[in-house]
Amino acid sequence: MNRFFFFLSFLLVAACTTVSKERLVMLNGYWEIERVEFPNGGQKEYKMNTTVDFIQVEGLKGYRKKMKPRFDGNYETSDDAESFEIAVEEDTYTLNYKNDLSAWKETLTAISEDNFSVQNEDGILYHYKRFEPIKINP
């Protein structure tokens, strides 16, 4: 019986994080890195972040911008943004970045309302969680 519940739980989690074209809009918003998994099995946890990523996707194009949250609920940022295009091959969704200095890609491995993961070309897996601003009441 325990195996059945474990298997059912696994299926539910997998279904809720599956990447699909309809789920790409879930990337829109503010995200902070939660942890990084390295190909050698090592991990790095991020307890606190001084910057967050703002991601905006429309269709199969988007951009990512570094933001610095302020205590008043606003953000500081520069005008720099990394544009990307999303390539779809079978069931794989890849964010393809290109600027004047380099080009790279990240493969979306999971996506939900509150989390997403991407793997870069070096096999490093980045896990993000939706950013929740700290609210300080005056």
Image: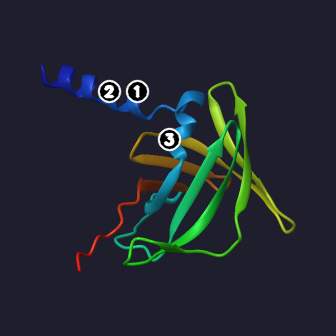
Residue 122 vs residue 69, the one in the foreground: 69
Extreme right residue here?
A: 100
Based on the displayed image, in which of its 4 quarters is residue 78 positioned? Answer: bottom right
Three-letter amino acid code at the position of disc 2: Leu
State the residue position of label 2: 12
Residue 94: image location, x then y, percent: 67, 42
Residue 84: image location, x then y, percent: 73, 51
Instruction: Give me the C-alpha separation between circle 3 and circle 1.
Output: 15 Å
For label 2, the crowd category at 10 Å Cα-Cα, with few meaning under 14, some 14 to 19 and many 20 or more, is: few
Residue shown at the point (58%, 54%) measured from the top left: 55
State the residue position of label 1: 15
Residue shown at the point (37%, 78%) measured from the top left: 71
Note whether residue 36 is visible. Answer: no
Query: Which quadrant: the C terminus?
Result: bottom left
21 over 54 or under it: above or below:
above
Instruction: Give me the C-alpha separation between circle 2 and circle 3.
Output: 18 Å
Extreme front residue here?
A: 138
State the residue position of label 3: 26
| Image marks 2 and 3: residues in contact by CB distance under 8 Å | no
Residue shown at the point (50%, 41%) measured from the top left: 26
Residue 53: image location, x then y, percent: 54, 63
| Image marks 2 and 1: residues in contact by CB distance under 8 Å | yes
For label 1, the crowd category at 10 Å Cα-Cα, with few meaning under 14, some 14 to 19 and many 20 or more, is: few
Mark in the foreground, 3 or 1: 3
Note whether residue 14 is visible. Answer: yes
